[in-house]
Amino acid sequence: MAGGITPNRIVTIPLEDYNSDHYLTLLYQSMVNLGWHIGYFDHDGIIAYTNISWESYSEEVSVRIKGNNVVIKSECVGYQFWFFDYGKNRKNLDVLLGEITYSEFHLQNELEQTTQELMDAVPEKQFLSLDDPPMAGKEQLRGFFSPIVPVKKYMITPILVIVNTIIFFFTTVCIRVLPLLLKNNPATPHENIYLKIYLWLGVNNRTQVLNGQVWRLITNTFLHFSTLHLVGNMIVLVYIGSLIESKLGKWNYLLMYLCTGITASMVSIIWNSAEISGGASGAIFGLFGILLALLSTDFYEKSARKALLISTAIFVAYNIIPIGEGIDHAAHFGGLVSGYLFGWMAYFGLSHKNNSIKKWGFAFMVSVVAVVFVSCAIIVSPQYQTKQYEVLMEKAEKQFNEINSDFYHTPDSITRQQKLDIIEHQALPEINELKKTANKITHLILSRRKKKEAIARAKLIDLECQTFQLLYRQFKEQNNYKYQEAIDNITGQINKVRTDYAKDN
């Protein structure tokens, strides 16, 4: 199989006149000649890793003795773009089988002795084994439906995929049907229908979470906004889950998934202001963070660790770059960092001699850290007054239109004195109220980006008010030249404020 989430290629070779130990010796010597890194060798088989180059960031080559046959498999360790191995696994097997001929020729008179020496040198206990290889979970992904079939060492990941998919179909139906039911409801403005539905479904939102709806930190991780969004996340979840679920244990794995998802969602709340967000990517980046932490230790065998570390680092580095609209980069970063921290906690827990700590200790500590982080973040995170800002801006726009009407849209039939009275008794008080509105806008608690916008718009309002006041004096004094320079100067300031704000955004 050249494609798939874990692209691999398998060849089966009859032993014929060779006994299994002799053929394993030939394979071992061939791998050494090729410069491959042997992670495991014994009577039952071999696990080795190819060299890392521009063409390949290491594949795992495993050999198993099955009856009177040798089964050799080359499998990609890292996540492959478009899920194809681009000929790497075929090339590995071709090179290996070609090298066997060379080894066979040079060892033909010494094969028995070399085999005996090699088998005598095998340590009683090795870091790796064919029963529990570094990519044990990936062994389960051997059919079209295998990613969604729960089996031993790969139990929670397919369940998460199924749950996410079912919820996606449910939310899709809601998004299609509920607007039809609500569109005739005068209490629900049309532009708010979809936002209300998404909030009802449980998406992440700063205002709601900081007002006590903490459950959104979990529910949003199971919500996706499109088929592409869902499929992309589930493919990567299957990949990373197949790598680490069997290493952490199914319940610890589930807890780590949820805790990194919650933490990532909270980081999104801290960073973002009023946007809604959802998706499993924060939790998935958390799983990559866990794997990176474990790969920073001796949790994996050295050769396997190097291959996995490079492939994982390439994937994370490529996907963590904050490029693209509509992507919650804060959640990705929060998941990755929290996952790395939780991964170290998992390492110390799993390597502890006490079985209780090994089984439940680090899971308890991860839960405590996640709860403490969320609690502290909710306490210290300011309540952004985004809604009040929108209300004040609507009020300011209405006041501006009324002032503009008093100056420019009075009936032609009224006298000059009547227009002056309108300006003095209606427009000037409205100008003072508009300036008060602008002052309130500058004192609102907003996100950094929104605050910058608010200050710019308040400045524009103040400058417009100054213009109206100068126009009033000009009209009252019947002098079209006295204040023109000042009006032109203010107009220049207005254009500069608008230009500077446009540049920054």
Image: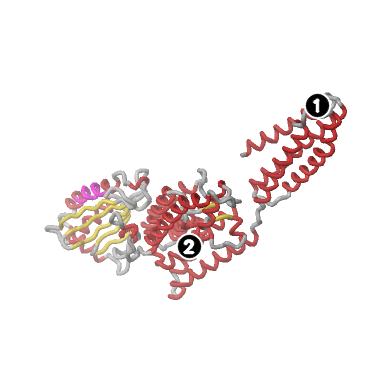
Which part of the image, by quadrant, shows the C terminus? Answer: top right
Residue, x 63% and y 36% (percent of image)?
503
Q: Is residue 131 left or right of residue 359?
A: left
Numbered circle sitting on residue 485: 1
Residue 320 in view (yes/no): yes
Residue extending farthest to the right is 477
**Residue type at numbered disc 2:** Leu
Residue 217 point in image, percent of width and height: 53, 60
Residue, x 15% and y 58% (percent of image)?
15
Residue, x 59% and y 55% (percent of image)?
206
Residue 154 point in image, percent of width and height: 35, 63
Region of the chain picked out in magenta, as a range: 92-100
Of residues 62 and 201, the one drawn nearer to the viewer in this rendering: 201
464 to 192, vertically: above or below: above
Residue 319 point in image, percent of width and height: 46, 48
Q: Secondary structure at mark 1?
A: helix
407 to 109, vertically: above or below: above
* 155 drawn magenta: no
Q: Can you tell which quarter of the image residue 472 is in?
A: top right
Q: Secondary structure at mark 2?
A: helix
Task: State the residue position of label 2.
Answer: 258
Q: Residues within 10 Å of mark 2 (few under 14, many from 20)?
A: many
157 to 466, vertically: above or below: below
Residue 331 point in image, percent of width and height: 52, 53
